[in-house]
Image (spheres, coloured by chain):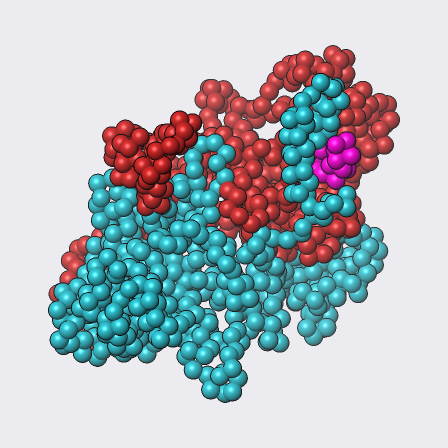
Chain colours: A red, B cyan
Amino acid sequence: MYTLGMFCVRACSGLVAIRTASHVRFLHSFPGITVAQIDEEVAKLLELKARIGGDDGKHQFVLKTAKGTRDYNPKQMAIREKVFNTIISCFKRHGAETIDTPVFELKETLTGKYGEDSKLIYDLKDQGGELLSLRYDLTVPFARYLAMNKITNIKRYHIAKVYRRDNPAMTRGRYREFYQCDFDIAGQYDAMIPDAECLKIVHEIFSELELGDFCIKVNDRRILDGMFAVCGVPDDKFRTICSTVDKLDKMAWEDVKKEMVNEKGLSEEVADQIGEYVSMKGGMDLAERLLQDQKMCKSKQACAGLSDIRLLFSYLQLFQVTDKVVFDLSLARGLDYYTGIIYEGVLTQAGVTVVSNEAQKGAPSEESVSVGSVAGGGRYDGLVSMFDPKGRKVPCVGVSIGIERIFSIMEQKAEASAEKVRTTEVQVMVASAQKNLLEERLKLITDLWNAGIKAEVMYKKNPKLLSQLQHCEESGIPLVAILGEQELKDGVVKLRIVATREEFDISRADLIGEIKKRTSEA
Amino acid sequence: MYTLGMFCVRACSGLVAIRTASHVRFLHSFPGITVAQIDEEVAKLLELKARIGGDDGKHQFVLKTAKGTRDYNPKQMAIREKVFNTIISCFKRHGAETIDTPVFELKETLTGKYGEDSKLIYDLKDQGGELLSLRYDLTVPFARYLAMNKITNIKRYHIAKVYRRDNPAMTRGRYREFYQCDFDIAGQYDAMIPDAECLKIVHEIFSELELGDFCIKVNDRRILDGMFAVCGVPDDKFRTICSTVDKLDKMAWEDVKKEMVNEKGLSEEVADQIGEYVSMKGGMDLAERLLQDQKMCKSKQACAGLSDIRLLFSYLQLFQVTDKVVFDLSLARGLDYYTGIIYEGVLTQAGVTVVSNEAQKGAPSEESVSVGSVAGGGRYDGLVSMFDPKGRKVPCVGVSIGIERIFSIMEQKAEASAEKVRTTEVQVMVASAQKNLLEERLKLITDLWNAGIKAEVMYKKNPKLLSQLQHCEESGIPLVAILGEQELKDGVVKLRIVATREEFDISRADLIGEIKKRTSEA
């Protein structure tokens, strides 16, 4: 016991050491302690030991980030910034404002919004005060924000990190901390106009990021529910059968059917009827055909959904994006809060990321090279009213772009390409060819900074000219302003063009103009 | 019991309701249940009830953000973006790259880095797996990043949220979740050159943000320690006396002295000697005078610090920023990890925020209107080696700009000013004067979006022209492209300049060019 205590005193951080020391004192000053108490103390200390890790008395600190998270180095940040800029430009082009909400919410705010996925929510430790959880998405905080501020219409984007205690597959761009780029339109509007704009946005972003071929699947919760009803699924099984249908992008129909029959208790016949419907894909024509479908027609809900899909496609035609949009009855989406149209953007040809056997054989197909969904969304007309004290409804539709998989693809593209990614925007390096010119370099760079020029100087009294030039080559700095005794005497600076190694003298008065001219061209 | 169960079924969210219902079933189907089991169930349900809050059978959901946190609405975001842009431009002008790290770290990574402030760290709940904490600052994750990636020199900025379970004073811009904008230079360089650049950066940012008058206090941990030594403070009391000195910006010397004598056990004489030193403020001249000080000279440490302050001021002169920098021996700073120079940027004249009695009487003084520190930093040469398995040192110096107080000031400025803050960048509204032109509006806006124009359309089939024009006035959209039957026949669009109410027809072919021309001028 004492040895254990000492081990901890040596190995632990200040706080723990004090706690342990007090345990030890406790045992010494009260010899009448019970065995059970000692056992408890031993268990606590052993647990502590296990956490500290190792028997050798030396604390091996684990140098890593938390499971499922990553750092971004400067090169990765440069790529990330490029992706963000493309996405933000698109959101702004469509007239969105932006908001921000805290990274954690009252636990209660998130409760009952995510169905089975609620188990993936990160809770904060109860340290006194409110019970808090990290946000799971940006949609529920958005709905909370609308209700709290009594906002009935807004078009906003929100780009921020969300948190899910999922089993990460980081090589495929799946993390426990990841960015979502959300665009949502809240307000009472005419049917399908904002919904169509969300799809237009996905189309624009995927196209501009040059992620290869893609496809946007659309469906409607009302069509799914209506279909379940006319196929004979009991009302109380709609959501759970919906979850099973949602697995069709990862599982074969045969296995999905098995789950429906064996686990969810549907009859073979009912399952087969569902199977027929969920295999259907098409465009406006499919919506029209299903509106004539004898069985489907029996469901008012399904009809409403199908009419809206038809209307949606008519707007998508005007937006010139029908080439990529597929009405797909197998699309279900996991989240509880959707009430109408749902959609998912899928990259179908991102060869650099996932190369399956088929693809290697030169026969890429949608299934074989899919990297999965990188955008998703839908209509959620009932979420805001869950927060509003009077249950007032604010109809909403939105889309969320998942950035991490896009980053993975862009990163691999950047690595594969010969082009060098610059991580700074420095325009000029202030260098010296001789010793004892630090003061002169600092004077010159002050002038440049004050004129808004991006400039660097080596933090050495007497750096070698070669190492100053090398730094420019490595980090892509296009210009060097070189000072020497002669230049100082003549009131000039030697300007060197790094790419061509060309050098010429320029007067101090003209330097700033020259740098601006040469770097604005680039 | 049953009533309670029913209460929960009515009042709770889906998940809880199911759990409660199963409790109820359980009680009904096993009448042989023990009293202890029932008591346990009762306790669980009562706890549940307490969490739900209230006896009235109606669940009062609290619609708020977590304590000490806030949302940013679009107007606030517009201001925030402006502030960020100024800060990022400055960091980039000085050649910094950027990185990002996760919002939570292994708890162990943060342990033992913050001294007494460690109690303010947010821990995540132990849900199995690693023990995690929310980051407390960006400096410790930066040091972890350097050690993990064996980086020995880098100049990077990092703008991100940090978390402290402090008692927030939100009206004064103090939060539990807040942004830090960090700029740090890591690497073995010649003394005081990077340190001086950090101060230059604070000077540039404060000036560009037009936050009123400011002052940058500098000191050095080695001067403080040397001063304590020559005044006769015992070695083991350096840190705690340093914490007491740190209170001088909020407490009068008399009270600080009392704490030193009564709580920390210094003699009156020692305290008075410290009091003499910490009242000293000046520039390079003060450093030179203290280098001649008989007593101070006895400490090698103090001398090294004073020489560096002198050198620092010589570089600050070259950077043209000495007007705002004060060598202030009372500056101590709380954090443990500083090893050399320390500094703090203080706004001294942000009248809009804090108006004390003195200031109202027309006699503003540095003390009376100070809104406190909005930037701080220093040299921490030992932090990276705490993470490096071999204890390798990477000298670092950096500065952290606290954004929330700056936001508060900028927000109040914006409110006080007549100028309207735009929250979108929309250039043109696509409107119609007659009914049944939705399709034509959508066609036109598609052309505009595809040409990169920021454009909006009302999500109504037949919006009134007046409401379309009103929306433009309200949100500052400068142009309206109006479609009517006649315009469609003539192949033109009526372009309206919102500010002047001027209107003219323009051919569809020339529209995009005209919009670009008119909005690039703005």
User: What type of secondary structure mainly makes up the magenta span?
Assistant: helix
Query: Could you say where residue B275 lies in the image, as x and y percent from the top left?
Result: 28, 75
Query: From where the camera sits, is residue A415 visible?
Result: yes
Q: Nearer the viewer, residue A507 or A294?
A: A294
Q: What residue lies at 24% left-to-right and 57% top-to-bottom? A: B236
Figure disc tally: 0
Query: Could you say where residue B217 lies in the image, as x and y percent from the top left?
Result: 33, 71
The region drawn magenta spans B1-17
**Considering the image in quadrants, where does the N terminus of chain B appear?**
top right
Q: Is residue B510 left or right of residue B159?
A: right
Name above or below for residue A426 compared with residue A193.
below
Q: What residue lies at 75% left-to-right and 65% top-to-bottom? A: B469
Q: What residue lies at 12% left-to-right and 69% top-to-bottom? A: B298
Query: Could you say where residue B409 lies in the image, as x and y percent from the top left?
Result: 52, 70
Q: Is residue B380 left or right of residue B111?
A: left
Query: Could you say where residue A123 lies in the image, as x and y percent from the top left?
Result: 54, 40
Q: What residue lies at 49% left-to-right and 20% top-to-bottom? A: A358
Q: Is residue A323 left or right of residue B382?
A: right
Q: Is residue B389 left or right of residue A486?
A: right
Can you tell which quarter of the image residue B365 is in? Answer: bottom left
Query: From where the camera sits, is residue A512 visible?
Result: no
Q: Nearer the viewer, residue A35 or B423?
A: A35
The reply to whether the magenta stretch includes residue B29 is no
Q: Nearer the viewer, residue A140 or B466?
A: A140
**Considering the image in quadrants, where does the C terminus of chain B appear?**
bottom right
Q: Residue furthest bottom?
A: B362
Name above or below for residue A348 compared with residue A21.
above
The reply to whether the magenta stretch includes residue B12 is yes
Name above or below for residue A137 compared with residue A283.
below
